[in-house]
Amino acid sequence: MFEFDIQHRDGRARVAQFHTPRGTLTTPMFMPVGTQGTVKGISPQELIEIKSQMILGNTYHLMLRPGEELVRAHGGLPGFTAYPGPFLTDSGGFQVMSLGHMRKITEEGVTFKSHLDGSMVKLTPERSIEVQQALGADVIMAFDECPPFPAEREYITRSLERTIRWLDRCLSVQNNDHQALFAIVQGGIHEDLRQHSLDLTLPFNTLGFAIGGLAVGESKAEMYPAVAFTAARLPENKPRYLMGVGHPEDLVAGIALGVDMFDCVYPTRTGRFGYALTDDGRLNMNSSAPRRQLEPIDADCDCYACRHYTRAYLAHLVRAEELLAPRMLSLHNLRYLHRLVERARDAIAVGEFGQWATTWAERYFKGQIPDWFADTLQQEPSAGQPPAMR
Amino acid sequence: MFEFDIQHRDGRARVAQFHTPRGTLTTPMFMPVGTQGTVKGISPQELIEIKSQMILGNTYHLMLRPGEELVRAHGGLPGFTAYPGPFLTDSGGFQVMSLGHMRKITEEGVTFKSHLDGSMVKLTPERSIEVQQALGADVIMAFDECPPFPAEREYITRSLERTIRWLDRCLSVQNNDHQALFAIVQGGIHEDLRQHSLDLTLPFNTLGFAIGGLAVGESKAEMYPAVAFTAARLPENKPRYLMGVGHPEDLVAGIALGVDMFDCVYPTRTGRFGYALTDDGRLNMNSSAPRRQLEPIDADCDCYACRHYTRAYLAHLVRAEELLAPRMLSLHNLRYLHRLVERARDAIAVGEFGQWATTWAERYFKGQIPDWFADTLQQEPSAGQPPAMR
């Protein structure tokens, strides 16, 4: 039921068709985050209009409220949220670390205090899969620990080894074939620990692999070598998912390194704060300049906000704290990221990704392309099966 | 450019086509309120989908922020807000009374302290029309004073007489034919003062008339006799607008008394507070019952929320304080009021309005129809031209 067909390659970047039970996705793709069963402020119809493909749901949040059984009673997330396409759910592991209080990690799993009502909750690999089965996403994630940054090498090692034992337990209870379980490679920003995690993870031969444990506080100069190292050693013929990333520049850099899937709350969160994403960087709609500008945020954008509204109108909504402001800026920002990956795919298809990415970055970074970004465009193409798979 | 063609009559209720430069409206109609240039949380496309006809804008708010010149630079409210249909703007008089601080009313106009930045602002009949011309609505309102409730008879009399002098000044500066200026009849809940206001207002022969000064704190038993008295004495062949009303029961009662136009922030405001309007009364989505109900708010409703979501999902959004909650409940509530007037129009067209209204009220009031409501259904039909116009 799951297939990953690569259609174009350009350096390490690739365009593929990812077939899932609820539809075929074209990668690279950005997945909007619907934490509590809704992409904040956006309707399913709008997600379809802006060409979203797969929506992310959060196991931690949905398990606590409204509870996974209510979602199951709706036929899973598509019935509950009315978004009829494919979903991906995370395992809850990351949120336990970032939102749970008084958490205690043992071999069995994690106990923590709910951020909602203070009750003690236990999440184990088995329980995470049980919840994700109830939520019914097409892609589900192995229950992992994402260590904070910075963390001791020794802790990262112990943690990633436990994550492997948890992966084994997840796979032992994942008993249906309409949900693809992806393993998550950890190891922080250390090459040898990434290699250690890869050595232990790849033999499970899951339907896809995620690069976890990044974008948690390290610099981009520290993060991207770890992405490059890990992505190059993941199987060529399976989707690669860089979790919790990213900003526009992260999508372009990640695609350059062979990443296929991204998710991040950034476009909707920054939209709620009054910022609009553009090829010229982030536009602050709280500032005074846009209040008199009669042009759209982005004349090339086909989102509802750009087709109907001036910057002056949207800046007025932001200033007046109108509900339509976060809605329209979130919609635009999501569409911006979708258009960005669409443009990247088009460039890959014609073998001009590096040139396109450089041109895009020159404008986006206003002529000051940072080294970490330039480095991602200068990686040698991976040759066939990566080292770890030979 | 403005015509009002009555197509059906049933008792005092009537169905008409109100032709305006931006389109023909079918009355009775409910107008969503777009105070600051947006119906809170709702896009123009959605307003069209739920069959909104005319949108109300507030002169007071738009004059203060973003300023009427910016709206004019967009070609008026349709260009600014991207709602391509007809608009109505109020005169600012009511908001000065309810929102302005330290206000001082003189023969010239009103000075007040802006609720936004504390600056002193002056609003006169001439200035109100100037702003409304810049906003570019199809129907604009005379600058009036709406006395508080309760107020002394002597004060109401002085106020309504000044409002007439202000009407005269408004008309003397309203110099285009694509904006219809409606006069406003005042007089509180006193028949003789309403008659006094009518006697002074009707000779101006404006293109429509509003019933003002109601729904400001008096009981429905006090308000509806004043509506009945006033509406019956307004010209048969011109639109009648009951300002700032209402709740579902107000629309049905007002229609029974021959009112054609209504506006109120109620559907969007109560939606933001988590309430959904239904034929069974107002549903509290904050309560625990809806959290387990897998049916829509209203199976007969054709709004996006009712076609896509269960009560359980929407109650989850309310509880989780998700942006989609106020949006979807506001959308449903607006559509509920639009459907309510559509059903009333259908009943009028076949001469069954009284029966329909009684059946609707039996269910809505759970068998306990209040006297004030029953009284509105038992008025004798007006016979042709009302008394004051003979």
Image (tube, coloured by chain):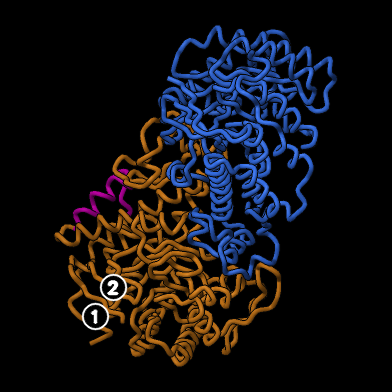
Chain colours: A blue, B orange
In the rendering, at what x and y percent does residue B209 appear?
36, 78
Q: Residues within 10 Å of mark 1 (few under 14, many from 20)?
A: some
Q: Nearest the camera: B107 or B377?
A: B107
* Residue B386, numbered label: 1
Q: Is residue A332 left or right of residue B259?
A: right
Q: Chain of mark 2?
A: B
Percent coordinates x, y for residue B111 in the rendering? 63, 81
Residue numbers of the magenta segment: B353-370
The chief SS type of the magenta part is helix
Few, some or many C-alpha atoms within 10 Å of disc 2 (few <14, some 14-19, many ≥20)?
some
Between circles 2 and 1, the one closer to the viewer is 2
Query: What separation in Å lies between label 2 and label 1 (alpha carbons)?
Result: 20 Å
Which quarter of the figure is the N terminus of chain A placed in?
Answer: top left
Q: Chain of mark 1?
A: B
Residue positioned 46% across, 83% down in the render: B160
Q: Is residue A137 visible?
A: no
Give the x, y percent position of residue A287. 70, 62
Q: Quadrant of residue A61?
A: top right
Q: Is residue A27 visible?
A: yes
> Which quadrant: the C terminus of chain A?
top right
Q: Nearer the viewer, residue B286 or B174?
A: B174
- Establish if A365 lies above or below A316: above
